[in-house]
Amino acid sequence: MQPIYKKVQLNTKSTQTFVYLRVNSYSMKPTISIQGEQKESLIKTTEALIDKINREIPMLKKSITEVPNVHLANEVSYHFASVPLLLRLSLLDLCILFKLYLESNSDTEQNMLIRLICGQLYEFTEDVPTLFGKKYRELLSNFPNSGDLIKDLNGNVTKEFNLAKLRHVDFLKIIRHNVSHHKDIDALWQYYLINNIDFNWGIKAYIDFTQWYVSHYSTFELKLIDIAMKAQAATKNDC
């Protein structure tokens, strides 16, 4: 269920300040309490994902830098490693922030960490569609059964990402543009946003996007790797 916000005018002498406040029945406290087995399970899952990404990043970097005569700005094949590397670099930051959030016992620290996560997630929602743009699709067109791959990209990877984005982007945008990095010049508005918006939605957004990465993008990526390895093996056998 989407959170519902109401634009409320505050009576101040210096400025007309508007604040988006929750008007549905859910709690408005700024942090979520994750305790006991649920907390331990989330910490273990997050640590496992951090370890996995940390192992994969050097391999992807190596696959880019050891290819001879690659023109990084124009080479379509560069995106075969570049896209998954960029996704992992972004997701690694989010996982580390979320782990710090889980391990913190301070409401103030948790509030700040969730705001940072929301800011990062908003940038993530803006950047990912660009990664799957023209050059990436041109890369897929060189694969066997490219039509099926592009159909899978559109129907499984991109569609699921867009559904998660639709659920969360309005909330993430409010946090990103106002209190993630304190960009808004209206201090009172920032104060009300920090102390009144329900940050449960930030945690739900983080979980939804990491689940998208693990369940949808990673499955698609493994399919591409399998096809590429089989094609490479076939080429060697023909030599």
Image: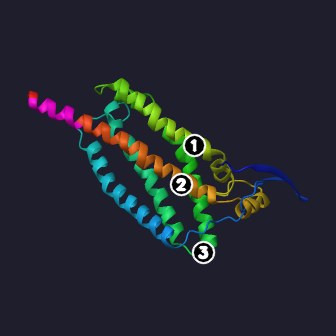
Mark-to-mark CA distance, 2 and 1 = 11 Å
Q: Judge the density around disc 3: few (<14), some (14-19), many (≥20) Cα neighbours within 10 Å.
A: few
Q: Nearer the viewer, mark 3 or mark 2?
A: 2
Say which quadrant the C terminus sits in: top left
Is 145 placed left or right of 118 in the picture?
Answer: left
The label on residue 106 is 3
Q: Is residue 15 magenta?
A: no
Q: Amino acid type of disc 2?
A: Tyr
Q: Is residue 112 above or below residue 167?
A: below
Q: Amino acid type of disc 3?
A: Ser
Q: Residue furthest bottom?
A: 105
Q: Nearer the viewer, mark 1 or mark 3?
A: 1
Residue topped by disc 1: 165
Q: Disc 1 or 3, which lies upstream in sequence?
A: 3
Could you say whether the residue bearing mark 1 is in a helix, strand or loop?
Answer: helix
Q: Position of residue 193 (x, y in %)?
A: 73, 59
Q: Residue at x 15, y 31 (%)?
A: 234
Asked whether 219 or 177 is in front, the reply is 219
Mark-to-mark CA distance, 3 and 2 = 20 Å
Q: Residue at x 50, y 49 (%)?
A: 209
- What's the image's color scheme? rainbow
Q: Amino acid type of disc 1?
A: Lys
Q: Is residue 185 above or below residue 66?
A: below
Could you say whether the residue bearing mark 2 is in a helix, strand or loop?
Answer: helix
| Span colored in magenta | 229-237
Residue 87 seen from this side: no
Q: Position of residue 22 (x, y in %)?
A: 75, 55
